[in-house]
Amino acid sequence: AQKTTRQSIAGYAGCQPENIVAGAGADELIDLICRLVLNKGDKVLTFTPTFSYYSHVVELNSGKMVEIERDKNYNIDISVLDDKAFEGVKVVLLCSPNNPSGNLLEKEVLDFFIEKDMIVVVDEAYYEFSRNSFIDKINEHNNLIILRTFSKCFGLAGLRVGYGVMSQQLQSAIMKLKPPYSVNMAAEVALQACLKNQKVFTAQVDEMIKTRDTTIEKLKQSDKLEVFPSCSN
């Protein structure tokens, strides 16, 4: 069943089953990545505000979370980062669209981190709302992992099912750590049903994007509010 799940997800994501690790939500995958690469005291870099769960998982795996503030538009300013910022850093966690600010990770920012000697994790939990992905980079970069979930657009949050897309080498290493039955049967059945009814979810997302854009435009009419763009839900 796990193999069938990987095949179905690969078909949806546009890659090979050998590039996929399915997990009990993307949260399990973050935990597995930390277990794979962190020794006690190793650092994980992220840029705040972002998804608060990251620091919890890093600390559980005896790592040290290093948080650098984003700029006033919630973007990552790589010009403030020198070699010292990367000492002892094994993983960088980037979120695109970022949770909670809704803005996309810029390609040149991702390329900057990919060139470093560490694992680069891009959390694309809200990918379906942005329709913007870096998944096409996984075959050329052995240190890149894209995380996705069925919790948001597909509404399966309570069933816990997510997936990571990565090089075959990384997939093989993580599969050695992963519990074999972490994605339960109900989640696998629900996932297959979602993928067979993609048109329904695409239509829902179309409607949400329309509502989002209309809401942003209306809020912008108030001179008392500073409205930031969003590529999320």
Image (cartoon, rainbow, N blue to C red):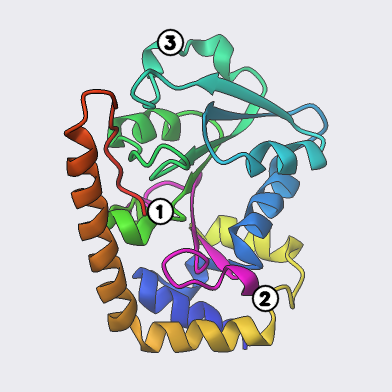
* Left or right placement of residue 178 versus residue 224 in this view: right
Quarter of the image with the N terminus is: bottom right
Front-most of 223 and 20? 223
- Above or below 201: residue 73: above
Q: Residue at x 72, y 73 (%)?
A: 182
- Above or below 73: residue 205: below
Q: Secondary structure at mark 1?
A: loop
* Left or right placement of residue 191 versus residue 139 in this view: right
Tag 1: amino acid: Ile
Q: Where residue 183 is drawn, which disc sits there?
A: 2
* Residue corresponding to mark 1: 138
**Residue 218 location in percent, x, y?**
19, 42
Q: What is the crowding at mark 3: few (fewer than 14 residues within 10 Å), some, or many (at least 20)?
A: few
* Residue corresponding to mark 3: 80
Q: CA distance from mark 3 to mark 2?
A: 40 Å
* Left or right placement of residue 87 versus residue 218 in this view: right
Q: Which residues are magenta?
A: 136-164
Q: Disc 3 or 2, which lies upstream in sequence?
A: 3
Evaluate if marks 1 and 2 touch, with contact meaning CB atoms under 8 Å apart.
no
Evaluate if marks 3 and 2 touch, with contact meaning CB atoms under 8 Å apart.
no
Q: Residue at x 67, y 65 (%)?
A: 175
One can see residue 4 in this view: no
* Left or right placement of residue 224 versus residue 56 in this view: left
Q: Residue at x 54, y 85 (%)?
A: 190
